Amino acid sequence: MSFESLMRPQKVLLGVGGGIAAYKSAELVRRLQDRGCSVRCALSRSASAFIPPLTLEVLTGKPVVQQEYLTATGSGEELHITAAQWADVLCFAPATAHLLARLALGLADDFLTTTALAFPGPVLVAPAMHEEMWAKEAVQNNVARLADRGVIFIGPEVGPLASGEIGVGRMSHPLTIVEAVASQAPGLSPSPEASTKTDLAGRTVLISAGPTREPLDPVRYLGNRSSGKMGFSLAAAAARRGARVVLVAGPVALETPPGVERHDVTTALEMESVLARWAGEADLIVMTAAVADFRPKRVAAQKIKKGQGVPVLELVPNPDLLSGMATTAPRALRVGFAAETENVEENAQAKLERKGAHMIVANDVGRSDIGFRSDENEVTVYRSRGPSVFLARRSKNEIADHLMDLFSEELHHRDHRPADTAD
Ligand code: CTP
């Protein structure tokens, strides 16, 4: 990479395949532009059924090349050659199974594939398709072929698919794709979300997130409405600040934040045993999970049938994972979350004591505009040391950053306090 190329905007040719994830290409264009890239778009034959070319044309301020490029351009110009010479990076997002097959075979039956053949630089591919399709040997062979030739794959991720099922096949988040482009095109402006803080470097942060599910029989469970968003935002914030982050997640449909080590669990008991593996190493433990307080005493081996009468559920208590951390991680800074529907302060203060925690982040889940499933939150942090801190309503990502400021300050304080004041 020459000095000159670092000074000029990076040019990204975005090839959009014909899949439902094509609607995300508009955001991808914006995010690339945020980082100083000059972007042009080209659509495969069927992509315009999913994203109107005009949207991309207005966003990029440039004509969008479609299949009709094969008709006369009026200038005698060979568009695929000029495009291949113009671009620094060629990125296919979303890449369908069909597009992968055409790229793997080296077909040149439209603008995208012809340009790919003429392009000498880095090619990135963000596949998106149903899980069954992604797993097919035919598709995996094409992926392996392309990877062998140096094509860089981004995702696909686990998450909700167009079919409504959850599985691997979802296109990576536009920000993840931008990071991959940035790795091939040095000189992009820093991400607006990139933290310049490295105050958690060298720390291990253990986070629990999401709900737990307690099975009743092979098809039913007791669960709750936690989305896991707050815990995932905290994990992302801690990783950005340089921490090693271990995230233990109940069943949620969220992408793993970059740089985070994720372990999926289902029940409270599984969550307890996975958390125990890292508790001893953790400097900071943040328990955002909505752990079920009770589980069915017996789990039926077969589906409970209507004909057997109305079942009476006998429940037994689950262990309190946060309280248990006072024994398994006595030196760690331990933070709990309290979801309350009334008497928020009183209940949060009581939990602080009862659970041996250093901080309780309390929110009022009775409100529909914040808390469960919402992207926003408003919280008050009750502390064993110091007054409470109110964080007014804002995005969960911003709340996460402010909370990390508080946790980081407290870790710093604990590093420098006299040994005989340790708890
Ligand atoms: N928590 C836990 N294990 C449990 C229940 C809760 O670790 N079995 C943790 C949660 O992760 C959270 C904190 O304890 O950090 C408070 O959770 P909350 O559900 O508000 O508290 P509960 O103890 O369940 O109290 P209550 O249901 O009476 O409000």
Image (tube, rainbow, N blue to C red):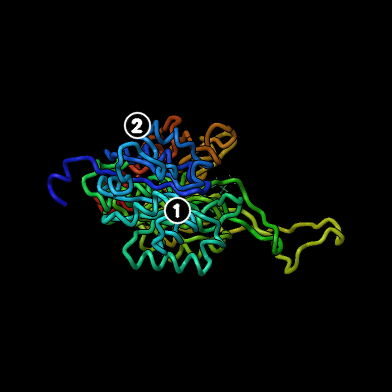
Query: Looking at this view, is 77 or 10 the one in front?
Result: 77
Residue receiving disc 1? 95
Residue 189 occupies which quadrant of the picture? top left
* Image coords of residue 261 (percent x, y): 40, 59
Residue under the point 48% across and 35% down: 376
Residue plotted at (40% across, 43% down): 69
Indicate if the residue with disc 2 has its beta carbon within 8 Å of ligand 1: no
Taking depth in this image into account, of 195 and 275 the one nearest to the observer is: 195
User: 399 or 260, which lies in front?
Assistant: 260
**At label 2, which amino acid type do we have?**
Gly
Q: Residue at x 13, y 44 (%)?
A: 4
Percent of width and height locating residue 297? 69, 63
Q: Is residue 267 above or below residue 253?
A: below
Q: Is residue 363 left or right of residue 92?
A: right
Asked whether the viewer can see residue 136, the reply is yes
- Nearer-N-terminus badge (2/1): 2
The residue that mark 2 highlights is: 61
